[in-house]
Image (cartoon, rainbow, N blue to C red):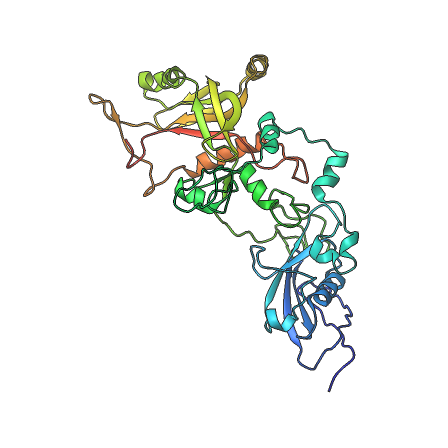
Amino acid sequence: MYLKSFSLKIHSSSRQNENAHCVCYNCTRQIKLVRIQSPEGIKRIEISPKSSFKQLYECVQRALKIDGFGLFKERNFSNELYANSSQQIGSALKHGDMIYVKQIAGSSTRRPSTASIDNFENFSGSLADNFSKTNVVIEDEVDQLLAKEDGLIKRGRDTKLCHHASNGCCVHCSPMEPYDESYLKEHKIKHLSFHSYIRKQTSGIDRGKYMVFDDINCRIKTGCRDHLPWPKGICSKCQPSAITLNRQVYRHVDNVMFENTNIVERFLNYWRTTGHQRMGFLYGTYEMNTDVPLGIRATVAAIYEPPQETTRDSIKFLDDEAINDVEEVAKALGLRKVGWIFTDLITDDPAAGTVKQLRGIETHFLTAQECITAGELQNRHPNSCKYSSNGSFGSKFVTVCVTEWIGYR
């Protein structure tokens, strides 16, 4: 027996359940229960397996009352379910499956999967374009130069595989993209450069029209009236979204180079004299790094050592009244603060001039306090990015640790 329509039942984890009505055609009595994970919590939707993904998007849109979203099968927002897909829900989802909603922050403009519900051809603009219309983002000079580069990796003619003339080209000698996995693996490049990562994100059919970089927000939303303020109460509406840790595939700076060895030698003289640790700020420039496709190198011209209290195993930062003067001098010389450097050197044999090996793959690379300090300094020096909804994303502020690594001499 076929039904012409059915009512969509919504069960919310919040105190006030929302009722919605959804009409799906060609429905049968075989009803699937699909769970929807959104920043507001988990909702359950009953829908026919013969319904299309377009109808699923319509149901979710009415139930959650949101706009500009996409549906994904994985928690890390991979394996997207497109609204313009010709598949039926029953071919991709099972009874009780969880799908995840990702909303574009700060805009009601729909992404292509949502916009296809109404009219995909009428969709225009992107978050990056909308932001640039009202706020002009001035990126670093090195970013502007890399944006003009094609980034293609040139290859010569292969005498064994290429069977064309010298002026011809085939798949064996055509240029490769800067994010080509085989090239990165062959040259032992562990991380993509940031601009290679951008090229990879903009290499699809839409050319990155809907790409936007946003920093993670882990703050609890304020103003919820369903319970007492945090920490006395919390609900799925105001608690931050779950975060899954993963290794970052790109890096903003691919190499750090000192103009000469005297810069580091002068910095290490303090440790050699006192045995105490030392830190300093790196002043230099950001330049293009040809060793990595579309890479960036931080070239250090000077180390400024601010006021600090040091011991054999600790460093305490003190207020620096001269920092503004230092910044003015650096600016006049065409330099900027590109990172910070600190020592972790414990003498092992004074006669031989050796130090203890404390860090490595079997122990640690950075301590928790060092990671927190590096993160705080990066937050103080954000990286201007036109693809971000707020004009900045990540940081080029580098961290250099002078130590003895286990397994390296």
Q: Residue 386 at x, y = what percent?
A: 66, 36
Q: Nearer the viewer, residue 15 or 179?
A: 179
Task: Count how many numbered circles sit on residues in the image.
Answer: 0
Horizontal side of 208 relative to 301 (left or right) equals right
Position of 215 relative to 10 (above/below): above
Q: Which residue is at a point 61% across and 33% down the rendered structure image?
A: 147
Which residue occupies the foreground of this view, 46 or 24?
24
Q: Residue furthest front?
A: 165
State the image quarter where residue 407 is shown.
top left
Q: Residue at x 47, y 21 (%)?
A: 300
Direction from residue 377 to residue 270 in the image, left or right: left
Asked if residue 296 can be seen in this view, the reply is yes
- In the displayed structure, would residue 389 be above or below residue 317? below
Considering every residue shown, the one lying at the far left of the view is 351
> In the rendering, at what x and y percent does residue 29 appear?
69, 82
* Residue farthest bottom in this picture: 1
Whether residue 383 is visible to the viewer of this picture, yes or no, is no
Q: Position of residue 265 (x, y in %)?
A: 36, 17
Residue closest to the eye, 66 or 110: 110
Is 204 displayed left or right of 66 in the figure? left
Q: Does residue 199 lie above or below 264 as drawn?
A: below
Residue appearing at x 60%, y 25% in the figure: 141
Q: Quadrant of the C terminus?
A: top left
Locate the N terminus and report the quarter of the image it occupies: bottom right
- Report which quarter residue 7 is drawn in: bottom right
Where is residue 231 drawn, in percent x and y? 61, 50
- Residue closest to the eye, 170 or 27: 170
